[in-house]
């Protein structure tokens, strides 16, 4: 076996590497910037860049890239070579850094300019590996080529990538990856990292104010901690390539229910099949090299579905690592002859895939601010943070729903495999009883830890948790953290965390404003906790969120039920949301309008691509299959009729069945084509999105029902695509 602790993180320019390679004063300055958010001086950046380049080259890297997260929801990268012409064609060497951070006398941007002038670029010229502080700190990309929601016009191309010092650089595919933010020429955010960092900064500021009220002067930072559980499907790549819908949209648009799905629950936590185990092993090893603490892997409920879980880390780093995980899942699967599906609902009729965000707050002293301790009833600090969270989730429930909105997630939310679109919180019995007692000014007796009685004497006694888990809750307390379960598998974890961080920061700001001026702190604190719980307890629900009656109960409580994403996305530009984000310095009004346009446009484009793909599959695969089969049936029927002695009732009945189903398919296909023609090219984007939902989605659902009804009657030799059974059982 490999020495895992020895090679873990060996491809990361982490703290240990920096401490070893940087002068003490430079290392301390960099650490101060990382931990306290102080300004990074350019001379420090120059020294760090030179050390980073030397380390990367020694590891085999030849290029570097500013790795960023545009509003596409994925990542982007442009690779630049370290290779630079040496001065006078001569012998500059890799480690020689000038005062300006360049290598030799030509480095960084100056080197590229020199090449254009012909300096050192002759046939006999030498080469060096160079990387300047300016190249580390800032890059440039064509901002108009990425979704901007109107922030950038086609002729306004300049955009900047800016080094995120808080997230370590790493090496992948012989390239040094530098995590960066992405912004416009005017400084507006064009990515998901920048507002995430802003929201973390806002929450840190307000949380520290609360800690100071409790006499905590040692904590210098409160970090948002996050662990993202990633679900996904694996199918055989050959079968995947025979499905245009999977290639174009990530999900199957057609497919009759297979004889066996997940009914027996025999796939859940079952043993990994050899090909899956080999895939998981390579994926884990690669992620360990990149410093990702992957700790859990297992089969999920649906056949072909799996889950990978990393350990908790700071939210910004967790977001970067989750993007890495998704990227490596796809590339690793390809090497194993597999296809990794990250869509929220790749297959109808079985569970889809989510991404559960485990969220908590931790001070840099190590204290978890959502840990109730042994006596939570007496833990006023914990109760204040808990009620602030309840206030935030209740007041901004529509925004949290919007933060997980997508055309794909609409297929998953509320489908008895994921939480419903109604936002609520699960607190568990103990916390609910404590808060109820506080509200009623009643006493509370702290419960002693109980031992689980399993009924087998040979098994050891284990302590019983204070409360059970609730997998149906969108936002469930699981002991020292909350699990936000609404996010779909392919989405960036940044979006919901930005909304949650900002809402909690606002609640804490209001608490701090009130308590900092209090002359009777303890009395006013007790009153604040009591009143906040009383006003916002409607958001707490410990029951079955899948139950039909919950929707009625939620409506009576005044909770929102925005089942469709298109109904929730406008919350980004409500006066309430704009005021929240601007007050906390997370988004400007312009940036929110930009994101709103991007989300709505993405919704429309997703459905348009799905509809066009469906039409293509019908004309290119389904209709020819039906015609071919009917032709052969007709030929057989004609032959038997010519003989005059055979019973033709089976052929008559089957041909009539196929003809009738095919006619229905053609009628539904025409309806979908007409629905697409009826969508205007321009106009109000929200109106277009609602028209897609109301007409195109309905027509697609009707057409799918007709095709799936036809499929079981057409033999496999005619059907031009793999069936659900073929896809879900393709990995053996």
Image (tube, rainbow, N blue to C red):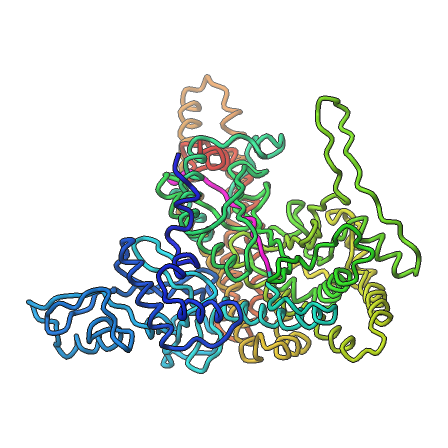
* 226 magenta-colored: yes
Q: Tell me if residue 720 can be seen.
A: no
Query: Which residue reaches farthest front?
Result: 24
Most extreme residue toward the left is 124
- Please say whether residue 278 is visible from this viewpoint: yes
Determine whether, in the image, residue 541 is placed left or right of residue 20.
Answer: right
**Quadrant of the snapshot with the C terminus:** top left
Left or right position of 169 against 166: left
Residue at the image point whose x is 40% and y is 30% from the top: 635
Residue 212 rendering spot, x and y as whole percentages: 70, 71
In the picture, the quarter occupied by the N terminus is top left
276 in the magenta segment = no
Residue displayed at 54% across by 38% down: 298
Which percent across, then down, holds residue 489? 54, 51
Left or right of 689 on screen, residue 628: left
The chief SS type of the magenta part is strand
Q: Residue at x 36, y 76 (%)?
A: 43
Residue 206 screen position, x and y as percent = 66, 72
Q: Which residues make up the magenta segment?
A: 225-237
């Amino acid at each position: 076996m490999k020495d895992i602790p020895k090679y873990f993180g060996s491809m990361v320019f982490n703290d240990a590497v920096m401490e070893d390679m940087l002068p003490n004063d430079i290392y301390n300055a960099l650490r101060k910037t990382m931990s306290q958010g102080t300004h990074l001086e350019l001379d420090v950046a120059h020294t760090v860049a030179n050390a980073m380049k030397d380390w990367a080259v020694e590891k085999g890297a030849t290029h570097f890239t500013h790795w960023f997260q545009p509003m596409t929801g994925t990542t982007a990268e442009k690779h630049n070579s370290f290779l630079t012409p040496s001065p006078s064609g001569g012998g500059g060497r890799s480690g020689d850094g000038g005062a300006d951070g360049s290598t030799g006398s030509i480095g960084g941007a100056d080197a590229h300019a020199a090449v254009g002038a012909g300096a050192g670029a002759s046939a006999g010229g030498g080469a060096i590996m160079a990387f300047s502080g300016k190249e580390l700190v800032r890059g440039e990309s064509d901002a108009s080529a990425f979704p901007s929601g109107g922030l950038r016009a086609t002729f306004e191309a300049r955009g900047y990538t800016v080094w995120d010092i808080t997230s370590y650089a790493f090496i992948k595919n012989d390239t040094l990856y530098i995590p960066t933010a992405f912004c416009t020429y005017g400084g507006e955010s064009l990515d998901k990292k920048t507002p995430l960092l802003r929201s973390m900064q806002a929450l840190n500021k307000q949380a520290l104010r609360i800690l100071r009220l409790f006499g905590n002067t040692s904590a210098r930072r409160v970090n948002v901690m996050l662990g993202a559980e990633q679900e996904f499907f694996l199918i055989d790549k050959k079968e995947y390539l025979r499905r245009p819908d999977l290639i174009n949209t990530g999900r199957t648009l057609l497919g009759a229910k297979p004889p066996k799905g997940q009914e027996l629950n025999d796939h859940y936590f079952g043993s990994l099949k050899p090909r899956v185990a080999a895939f998981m092993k390579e994926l884990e090893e690669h992620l360990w090299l990149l410093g990702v603490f992957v700790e859990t892997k297992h089969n999920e409920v649906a056949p072909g579905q799996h889950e990978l879980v990393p350990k908790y880390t700071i939210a910004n780093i967790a977001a970067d690592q989750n993007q890495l995980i998704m990227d490596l899942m796809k590339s690793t699967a390809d090497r194993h002859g597999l296809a990794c599906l990250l869509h929220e609902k790749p297959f109808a009729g079985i569970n889809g895939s989510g991404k559960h965000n485990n969220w908590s707050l931790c001070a840099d002293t190590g204290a978890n601010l959502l840990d109730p301790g042994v006596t939570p009833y007496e833990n006023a600090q914990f109760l204040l943070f808990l009620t602030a969270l309840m206030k935030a989730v209740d007041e901004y429930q529509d925004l949290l729903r919007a933060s997980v909105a997508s055309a794909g997630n609409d297929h998953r939310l509320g489908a008895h495999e994921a939480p419903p679109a109604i936002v609520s919180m699960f607190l568990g019995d103990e916390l609910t009883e404590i808060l109820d007692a506080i509200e009623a000014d009643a006493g509370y007796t702290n419960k002693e830890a109980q031992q689980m009685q399993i009924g087998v004497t040979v098994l050891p006694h284990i302590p019983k948790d204070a409360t059970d888990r609730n997998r149906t809750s969108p936002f469930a307390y699981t002991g020292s953290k909350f699990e936000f379960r609404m996010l779909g598998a392919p989405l960036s974890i940044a979006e919901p965390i930005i909304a949650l961080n900002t809402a909690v920061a606002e609640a804490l700001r209001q608490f701090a404003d009130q308590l900092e001026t209090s002359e009777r702190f303890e009395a006013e604190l007790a009153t604040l906790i009591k009143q906040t719980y009383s006003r916002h307890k409607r958001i707490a629900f410990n029951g079955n969120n899948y139950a039909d009656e919950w929707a009625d109960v939620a409506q009576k409580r005044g909770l929102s039920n925005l089942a469709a994403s298109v109904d929730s996305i406008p919350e980004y530009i409500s006066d309430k949301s704009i005021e929240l984000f601007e007050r906390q310095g997370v988004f400007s009004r312009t940036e929110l309008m930009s994101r709103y346009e991007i989300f709505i446009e993405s919704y429309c484009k997703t459905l348009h691509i799905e509809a066009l793909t469906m039409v293509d599959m019908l004309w290119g695969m389904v209709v020819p299959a039906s015609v071919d089969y009917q032709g052969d049936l007709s030929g057989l029927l004609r032959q038997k009729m010519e003989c005059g002695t055979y019973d033709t009732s089976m052929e008559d009945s089957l041909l009539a069945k196929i003809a009738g189903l095919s006619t229905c398919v053609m009628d539904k296909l025409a309806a979908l084509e007409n629905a697409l023609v009826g969508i205007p090219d321009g106009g109000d984007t929200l109106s277009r999105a609602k028209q897609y939902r109301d007409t195109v989605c309905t027509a697609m659902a009707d057409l799918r029902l007709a095709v799936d009804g036809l499929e079981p009657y057409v033999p496999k030799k005619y059907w031009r695509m793999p069936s659900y059974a073929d896809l879900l059982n393709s990995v053996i």
